[in-house]
Image (cartoon, rainbow, N blue to C red):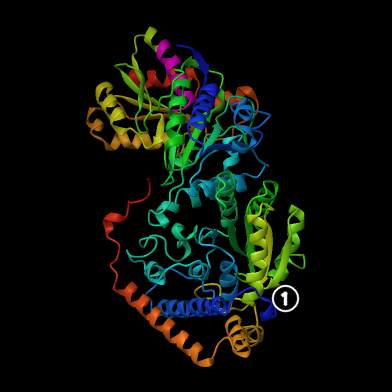
Amino acid sequence: MREITYANAIKEAMVQEMRSNEDVFILGEDIGVFGGAFGVTSGMLDEFGPERVRNTPISESAISGCAVGAAMMGMRPILELQFSDFVMIALDNIVNQAAKMRYMFGGKTHVPMVVRLPSGSGLGMAAQHSQSLEAWMAHVPGLIVIQPSTPYDAKGLMKTAINNDNPVIFYEHKGLYNSKSDVPEDEYDIPLGVADVKKEGEDLTVIATGIMVQRSLQAAEQLEKEGISIEVIDPRTLVPLDKETIIESVIKTNRALVVYEAVERSGYGAEIASLIGESEAFDFLDAPISRLGGIATPIPYNPSLEKAAVPQVEDIIEKVKSIVQK
Amino acid sequence: MVNNLEETIYSNQQMKKMLTDMMLIRSFEEAVEKLFQEGKIPGTMHLCIGQEATAVGACAALTDEDKITSTHRGHGHSIAKGAEIKPMMAELLGKATGYGKGKGGSMHIADLTIGNLGANGIVAAGLPIGTGAALASQMKKKGYVVLCFFGDGAANEGAFHEALNLASIWNLPVVFFCENNQYGMSGPVKEMVNIEHISDRAKSYGIPGFTINGNDVIEVAKATQEAVDRARSGEGPTLIEAETYRWRGHSRSDARKYRTREEEKDWRNTKDPISKFKERLIEESILTEKEFLEIQKTIDTEIHEAVSFAEESPEPSLDTLEVDIYV
């Protein structure tokens, strides 16, 4: 199998869907000749033309609402925002409109749109271009929230997202765009609400999201050398969440640590921790459920400060040891 | 704008239909007001009494395939676009037989089967959504036009400016229809906008803009028809500003301290869209007083039936609470 990048995996899924379904189109800022802020759409204009690869003005409010209206009328728009931080300007259309319309209208419409949000820190882009606010989205009934951590998952989940009839928030980690893994050329989809056990282990379950999946796997390698075996679970989709896989794993390992990049306070990891605490896994716990998330600070510019603001591999190792060796 | 009925393109039957629709809207709103005062309508409601000509005139220019987006003050738009008043009334009472199965209420009445993409509780939200619906029409060569209703208050929202620009650069089949009823809740338009006409803003986006008398249903219909024709023939969007007046307060419990009773009286007595149009139709021998009374009688029966239907309809079952959140 060939290896491709996370960015190209996302593009490949979009291209394949656009080839097979003419209702699918993409709109966003600088996605045409420029190829998107992170190059994800590069070359798509040449294949599909400006009608279906719609370069928009810098108008997040209009283009997000436009996606909602087009989706209500039978299209399947993919909206690319340059940075997930810019979603604040589009939130009315996502939260007040897309997420609620079906419910408010008594089930008589649906809004099949995908909002692609490049998120996360680590690129020196400071406080307005580095956030991880997926918990905001996961809080809103009516939205599907996806957060892939590998090229393989990104491609399969993008296909699923495009074909889903609900508004889907698709978090892409900027720090993963150049990461590579085996990705089949053929189309495939990954169902929503199915977590992936990225590594099996015995002593503790790490539930990690986004770029923290890779960091947790690196931590697992180091810990293995010290005789600590951790299981790493990637939920892949936050809404819906695969509760069973998480609970079963914790019943097996008797310890749980949730690792996420977002500010630890009120982050999605708190949801996962509560879920474990309220489940049958509670009776099997040999240690309190722990969280390891970001410091409650705006993401700083200075590279050392930025690194210190979110969990790194060493932080995960240290945290795991503190739980296992207690 | 030509006001002479003889020069209109509308048949006597069409004009009677416009009058009837305006009367139906007013009677509907009066019934809603009464039900609200009786405590039968939860929350709040926004009445469009006094603004009937904008809803009816604008929708008269649309086909069944054309779409509208509406506002928080949307009962008139729904009726003018062809909604049935029974499920509307049921929705206002929160009943299972309502358009939204009792889950949306006054600010979220929609019926996509007749091209109503929904009232909206967020000011100016309908403009980008309507722009997107127009994009779908253009991309799939559907031929329908989208008309976005919004108020003078919405013209100061970013969404208004962004949507007009987007619709203009993409040459979309959309009509932006501003009902300038002089107040955004309590904010007088003259205090909130530092230009003479909201329609002047069209120039910034390279599209035509007009200000019209929004209480003259024929003037509204003709101006909208021109805009709809432009949109349908691929000439892009138009901004129409229709000047009108909301007779009632913004919503519940509005003491209307921000305007005078004299001003209200002037609009009611000299610019009532229904009585002015009725007088004209009678003058031109298109309508008789007797016919007018018959129309009102039929409407009264229809409203009575709608209220009974709503009152007798079941409450939504509690097990529908989590239904229709996702497809």
Position of B318 relative to A80 (above/below): below
- Left or right of B306? Residue A281 is left
* Residue ID for mark 1: B2
Residue at screen point 61% across, 74% down: B10
Percent coordinates x, y for residue B85 in the rendering: 41, 71
Q: Chain of mark 1?
A: B
Q: Quadrant of the N terminus of chain B?
A: bottom right
Q: Can residue B182 be seen in the rendering of this structure?
A: no
Residue A289: quarter of image = top left
Residue at screen point 61% across, 48% down: A61
Position of B40 relative to B316 (above/below): below
SS for callout 1 = loop
Percent coordinates x, y for residue A286 in the rendering: 27, 25
Q: Quadrant of the C terminus of chain B?
A: top left
Magenta stretch? A209-222
Percent coordinates x, y for residue B145 in the rendering: 58, 56
Mark 1 Cα shell of 10 Å, populated few (<14), some (14-19), many (≥20): few
Amino acid on which disc 1 is placed = Val
- Left or right of A196? Residue B272 is right
Percent coordinates x, y for residue A221 in the rendering: 41, 11
Residue at screen point 64% across, 66% down: B224
The magenta stretch spans residue A44: no
Front residue of B284/B149: it is: B284
Front residue of A221/A265: it is: A221
Front residue of A166/B222: it is: B222
